[in-house]
Amino acid sequence: MRRREVLKLLGAAAACGIAPYDVASAAGGEDIYAIGKFGSARLLHMTDTHAQLNPVHFREPSVNLGIGSMQGRPPHLVGKAFLDHFGIKPGTRQAHAFTCLDFAKQAREYGRLGGFAHLKTLIDRLRAEAGSGRSLLVDGGDLVQGSGVADATGGAALIEAANLLGIEALTGHWEFTYGEDRLLELIKSFKGEFLAQNVFLTEEAAFNDKPALDSASGRVFKPATVKEVGGYRIGVIGQAMPYVPIAHPKRFTPDWTFGIRDAEMQKLVDGLRQKEKADAVILLSHNGMDVDLKLASRVTGIDVILGGHTHDAVPQPVSVANAGGKTLVTNAGSSGKFLAVVDLELGKGAVKDVRYRLLPVYADLLKADPDMQALIDRAGKPHAAAYSEKLAVSDALLYRRGNFNGTMDQLICDALRHELDAELALSPGFRWGNTMLPGEAITMEDVLSETAITYPQVYVTEMTGAQIKAVMEDICDNLFNPDPYFQQGGDMVRIGGMDYSCAPGETVGKRISDLTLDNGKPLEPDKSYKVAGWASVNPQTGKPVTEVFANYLRAQKTAQPKKLNRVVLKGVDGNPGIAG
């Protein structure tokens, strides 16, 4: 960036009340946020923050397998293969943000990422750089769930933060787990637009005249909007997570039905192009990247898909050819770690050029916005004493994200087995949940970042070995089904108390084998076992998992898994979705 451009940018920032900050000095001479101005309109995209108002450590996966045609393609690249594919130098800030390599060492060197106060500083800078009326900020969902403050305020604190950020469009996933009535209340207080083209009334709800945006079609929410940006018309379609009533308790959304609904989407795209005269059409998606890649090949007329749900941080768009030309597919990570910048050079009715950047949000490089920090402090103040309780000290790197067992969920499984006196434990393969470095104190707030959901009750049940295997096969098929439209997101269920083998490339019913208990005995199909778990889609009456986990940590003092249960992978040699 030339000196004149720098001075102009600082002048614009000062006019907006943004204090200049020496990012270059903090980053060792390179201002990683000096991306320059380009094009007619700037889209800013964040997604899957999971209510992390403060900066976090979040380790990217060491296992993210692509099977069949998806092998070796983004997003199924990890570690060195990821760096090589995208031309990122090892040991750098970029390498740390995007991979699991040397995570603890690099985390101590570069610090935490994200935080809404730091995001706001970056967003304001990028808006000022684009110029007045030339930018649009959108959020891909999973905004209001995943922290203690979100849980305590029923999502309200996050909507307040979203309004201060200036988010103009939002779609959803975990938002729906607050239930229909609460979600509608949150939407009323949201200053932007909640978009979801794929949510309709059920037949029974329509018959009973339940509320909907359009009673004739049964469409519950506004499907799309048109925004004037930089003198051009940009159509934005919202796509909520398609499998909400399957992945979560149906009782939260009894009147609504979901789905991918690409036929309805095609009609929307055509309408935006022909009737609304949109110069660009953007899909704000919570499908997951593999689903978006398939959808991009089937639906024509979408210029860019701004994707979320699978938490894949992909620094370059994937171009997908279709009958109408091509669509760029992106995915912007999670936990507030990244902000995507899509600069569009527009002409009447067409996108002439695109420049894309996925910027890591390093807290030490971005001064906290004082207004947002005041909001965060105010929201957390009533709960500060409880959330700051130090429960234990981490004696290992505790992380969740990855296709198979992570150390944090292994620790949760240890807690379930110990506190509920169970032989086996199941912990859901959620992709959210912060990372703890060795030697860090684990607080109640940290525990809530792993467990804060609206159906947290633990349970104990009897299951036969055959039933356990069947459950594992079903979840594994969801993860590795060769057709992305049958993938619901999330990772493999975590198992405490048992090792097993997995062949991801096999067909359903043939992927899971060699199930062996910690005592060395094989899991017997006809024998019953006492199994503990949490986050059941069926109503439960047990204690919240947060309480069970916290009690276990208090007693342990130091926290590390008793044993990391092994998953032996078969048929994946050389797959670049495995690091090391």
Image (cartoon, grey):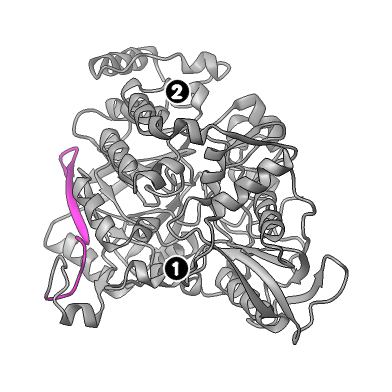
Q: Residue 272 location, x and y as percent?
A: 18, 60
Q: Residue 80 location, x and y as percent?
A: 70, 45
Of mark 1 and mark 2, the one earlier in the sequence is 1
Element at badge 1?
Answer: helix
- Farthest right residue in view: 520
Check disc 2 and give the amino acid type. Leu
Q: Report if residue 90 lies within the magenta region.
A: no
Which disc number belongs to residue 294?
1
| Residue plotted at (19% across, 37% down) | 230
Residue 569, can we see it?
A: no
Q: How much space separates mark 1 and mark 2, taking CA atoms?
A: 37 Å
Residue 401, can we see it?
A: yes
Check disc 1 and give the amino acid type. Lys
| Residue plotted at (44% across, 52% down) | 330
Question: Alpha-carbon neighbours of circle 2 within 10 Å: few (<14), some, or many (≥20)?
Answer: many
Q: Which residue is mark 2?
A: 366
Q: Is residue 106 above or below residue 493?
A: above
Q: Is residue 477 above or below residue 527?
A: above
With 358 as the anchor, is 121 left or right in this view?
left
Quarter holding the N terminus?
Answer: top left
Marks 1/2 in contact by CB < 8 Å: the verdict is no
Q: Residue 23 location, x and y as percent?
A: 47, 18
Q: Report if residue 223 lies within the magenta region.
A: yes
- Farthest bottom residue in view: 526
> Which portion, as a residue range, is magenta?
216-234
| Residue plotted at (37% across, 48% down) | 144
